[in-house]
Image (spheres, rainbow, N blue to C red):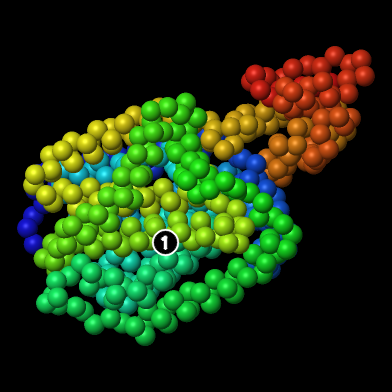
């Protein structure tokens, strides 16, 4: 094996530095941001519940992501229920995602490795979920790991590699059930692999004996594990009508459209949106065309053609399944964070396509130059979008933790001698109750979703709810006002 070139060593050093910055930014964000509505709901209703209630989803709600809830329960039992501890499993998942995306791209052209790694990882919306105690970050890390081992299996047909791929895909579904849209195509493609691979091989090329029995057994065990763990929870969600969130127009507008919208992270949709849509169309059209026109012997190349074909089939199959269930079964389309698995899956497909095109000497420089330009734009956008105080889907929680600190200080300075009540805008109920339990604040009564019209000593409400506060001639004292939400004492 030849030693790495100077370019390869520099690329890997820069890649390590970027990985440290990305992971460090997730840790910093997990430390500085308020706990959010969905995280708090999970803690209040599931993490503190008995194990049996978690596994059977006694309180039916899609808010509990099974593996994430179990990890939150385990970590909080050992280290305490601070936001950082509860978010730590997803910080570990970010490390795993960085490692596996590097491994997936490690055979890239030396001048493409770094920009392709940036393209997969520089997504401000995706990065949010590695600093949150939600199942999304875990599922994305397991997805990347499963893809890595599946491509290794396609390369060497060793059942151990497929076992790891299927295990990680199973964990991805347990982390977030929308990853079933990846699990099903993966299982199907593993059974079709002996048919798919020869498409790219000349008739005389050597073919490894395929471990049929092992693949069927692993698939069966994974499916049984998912059925055993998820049948009861999913049945309850369907029976109680909890699966109400999703798109109702079409895959392109709902799933793809909201993924572009969230990638832009609040920026005005303009030329950037059209560029991203153009890239998506280009990849989905160009990948099968170039594979058909440029068949190569994978036994004598880097295998970018084989891997590109498999990634493309996984991406296409997942899209078809989502679309088919919408039109045939009326199941709503995954949008925003529910469709987030398509982001790294697409970017990896783009990366392998660019690597494949760069094997052509005539267009290599153009491909490399265009990839670096795109990576630069992604980097600038991600840096500009970074926030250490909020998350795109929970901007209203920006000052909840700060508000609780202000409330504690004011209570110490103005003790009432009685249990303190608080009227709120309903959105803040889970997070205020989370902080009330974990700090703990025994003097504060549990808040409810009854709204700001209740009689209370303190009120934390959106500006639009200020007039609902029952003052009865009393003069309110404003303790905190960020322009959107206000804390007052009456």
Q: In percent of the image, x 43 and y 51: which residue is there?
A: 342
95, 312: nearer the viewer: 312
**In terms of image quadrants, where is residue 25?**
top left
Q: Quadrant of the N terminus?
A: bottom left
Q: At 44% from the left edge and 76% from the top edge, which residue is drawn?
A: 219
Decide: is 285 above or below 464: below
Image height check: is 256 above or below 326? above
Q: Secondary structure at mark 1?
A: helix
The x, y position of residue 5, in whole percent, is: 9, 48
Is residue 445 found left or right of 430 in the rendered image?
Answer: right
Q: Name the residue tied to disc 1.
A: 317
Residue visible at 67% across and 67% down?
235
Q: Position of residue 210 (x, y in %)?
A: 28, 81
Residue at 14% of width from left, 71% of height from top? Answer: 202
- Which sits in the foreground, 225 or 15? 225
Estimate the x, y position of residue 264 in percent, counting from the top left: 44, 33
Residue 356 makes an appearance in the image: yes
Dividing the image into 4 quarters, which one contains the C terminus? top right
Would you say residue 387 is visible in this rendering?
A: no
The reply, left or right, for residue 380 in relation to residue 487 is: left
The x and y percentages for residue 398 are 59, 30
């Amino acid at each position: 094996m030849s030693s790495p070139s100077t370019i390869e060593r520099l690329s890997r050093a820069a890649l390590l530095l970027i990985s440290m910055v990305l992971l460090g930014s997730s840790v910093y964000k997990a430390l500085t941001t308020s706990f959010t509505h969905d995280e708090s709901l999970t803690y209040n209703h599931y993490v503190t519940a008995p194990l049996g209630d978690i596994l059977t989803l006694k309180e039916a709600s899609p808010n509990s992501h099974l593996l994430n809830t179990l990890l939150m329960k385990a970590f909080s039992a050992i280290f305490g229920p601070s936001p950082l501890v509860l978010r730590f499993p997803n910080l570990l998942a970010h490390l795993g995602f960085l490692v596996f995306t590097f491994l997936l791209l490690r055979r890239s052209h030396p001048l493409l490795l770094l920009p392709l790694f940036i393209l997969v990882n520089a997504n401000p919306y995706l990065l949010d979920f590695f600093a949150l105690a939600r199942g999304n970050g875990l599922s994305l890390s397991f997805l990347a790991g499963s893809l890595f081992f599946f491509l290794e299996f396609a390369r060497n047909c060793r059942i151990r590699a497929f076992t790891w791929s299927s295990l990680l895909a199973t964990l991805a579904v347990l982390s977030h059930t929308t990853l079933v849209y990846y699990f099903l195509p993966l299982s199907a493609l593993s059974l079709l692999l002996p048919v798919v691979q020869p498409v790219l091989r000349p008739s005389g090329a050597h073919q490894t004996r395929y471990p049929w029995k092992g693949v069927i057994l692993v698939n069966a065990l994974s499916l049984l594990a998912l059925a055993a763990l998820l049948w009861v929870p999913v049945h309850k969600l369907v029976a109680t009508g909890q699966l109400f969130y999703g798109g109702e127009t079409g895959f392109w507008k709902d799933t793809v459209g909201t993924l572009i919208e969230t990638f832009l992270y609040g920026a005005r949709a303009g030329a950037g949106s059209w560029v991203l849509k153009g890239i998506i169309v280009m990849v989905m059209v160009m990948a099968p065309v170039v594979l058909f026109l440029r068949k190569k012997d994978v036994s004598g190349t880097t295998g970018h053609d084989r891997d590109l074909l498999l990634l493309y089939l996984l991406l296409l199959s997942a899209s078809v399944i989502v679309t088919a269930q919408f039109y045939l079964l009326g199941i709503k389309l995954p949008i925003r964070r529910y469709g987030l698995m398509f982001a790294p899956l697409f970017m990896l497909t783009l990366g392998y396509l660019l690597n494949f095109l760069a094997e052509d000497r005539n267009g290599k420089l153009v491909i490399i130059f265009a990839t670096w330009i795109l990576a630069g734009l992604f980097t600038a956008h991600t840096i500009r979008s970074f926030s250490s105080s909020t998350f795109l889907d929970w901007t209203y929680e920006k000052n909840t933790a700060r508000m609780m600190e202000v409330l504690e200080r004011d209570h110490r300075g103005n003790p009432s001698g009685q249990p303190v009540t608080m009227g709120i805008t309903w959105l803040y109920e889970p997070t205020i109750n989370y902080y009330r339990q974990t700090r703990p604040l025994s003097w504060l009564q549990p808040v409810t979703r009854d709204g700001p019209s209740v009689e209370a000593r303190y009120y934390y409400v959106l500006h639009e709810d200020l007039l609902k506060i029952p003052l009865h001639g009393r003069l309110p004292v404003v303790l905190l006002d960020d322009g959107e939400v206000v804390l007052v004492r009456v």
